[in-house]
Amino acid sequence: MSDLSSVKIFGNGTLKSGEFNKIQILGDVDATGDIKCNKLSVMGDLRIEGKLKCGDFKVMGECTLEESVETEDFNILGQVRAEKEVEVKSYLKVVGEFYITNSLKIKDGNIVGQVINKNNIFFDSLKVTGELRSMGDCEGNIFFSKGRLDISGLLSADKIEIVPKGNSTINEIGGSEICIRKNKYWEGSNGRVKANLIEGDKITLENTDCDIVRGEEITILGNCNIKRVEYTKTISIDKNSKVGEELCQNS
């Protein structure tokens, strides 16, 4: 693709469908068809009406994506609205705002800003220090959060570690190893997680409100309110936590 042309647009303009090396947007531009490029940089306002396939995608201004997106790297410092599915094959970093109507599939992600998703999120590893709001499920391998979470569906990963900032709400949490703990470096930390169901193999909870906790090895640390705990191996409950019912299912 080294023989492909590069495009730089200042002011108002239109970009027709095509295959490019580098595209740089510094004005207000409408792309009227499918775009394929090695690098896309948006410092102005870009609307893409067709599909986008890109190597390195960086948005410092505003961008609206009306069709599906496939990119290797996606760096959002401004604002992006995506109306169809988005796939990031390598690395996603969100410092600004990212609004997604359809599914988001990423390999590795880092959310420093805000992500609002109306569908499902699939990931290999995902780190949240900003805010993640999802109306669907979030499924992957490794999940770490020190930010605010609002997940209407299931948060599922092999390893889940949450250090809540403020009040986070997650409908269901499932994984092999689940750890929810307050910030140990800040004594005044009062972040909490509220969930209907937490289910896993090894579970450690602190500052957590949950209806049902189900697992093999369960440790309930301080400031938890749990209606029912179901365990098969071991259980430990801190005196500063409340558990309504304990049920050993070891048979």
Image: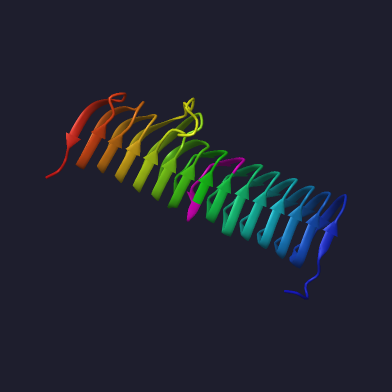
Query: Is residue 70 within the magenta segment?
Result: no
- 107 or 48, nearer to the observer: 107
Instruction: Tell whether 87 sits left or right of 218.
Output: right
Please name the residue shown 51% across and 29% down the image: 166
Instruction: Tell whether 249 sits left or right of 79.
Output: left
Please name the residue shown 44% across and 40% down the image: 162
Instruction: Tell whether 220 sits left or right of 16.
Output: left
Q: Position of residue 245 (x, y in %)?
A: 21, 28
Q: Residue furthest left?
A: 251
- Vertical placement of residue 209 versus 203, above or below: above
- Vertical placement of residue 60 versus 198, above or below: below
Query: Is residue 118 within the magenta segment?
Result: yes
Q: Position of residue 167 (x, y in %)?
A: 48, 28
Q: Position of residue 134 (x, y in %)?
A: 51, 40
- 80 or 160, nearer to the observer: 160
Report if residue 2 is visible in the image: yes
Residue 238, quarter of picture: top left
The N terminus lies in quadrant = bottom right
In the rendered structure, which segment of residues is drawn in magenta? Answer: 112-125
- Vertical placement of residue 251 versus 236, above or below: below
- Vertical placement of residue 72 versus 165, above or below: below
The C terminus lies in quadrant = top left
Report if residue 200 is visible in the image: no
Q: Position of residue 193 (x, y in %)?
A: 42, 32
Please name the residue shown 50% across and 30% down the image: 186
Instruction: Tell whether 72 sits left or right of 122.
Output: right
- 155 or 242, nearer to the observer: 242
Residue 161, quarter of picture: top left
Residue 223, quarter of picture: top left
Please name the residue shown 40% across and 43% down the image: 154
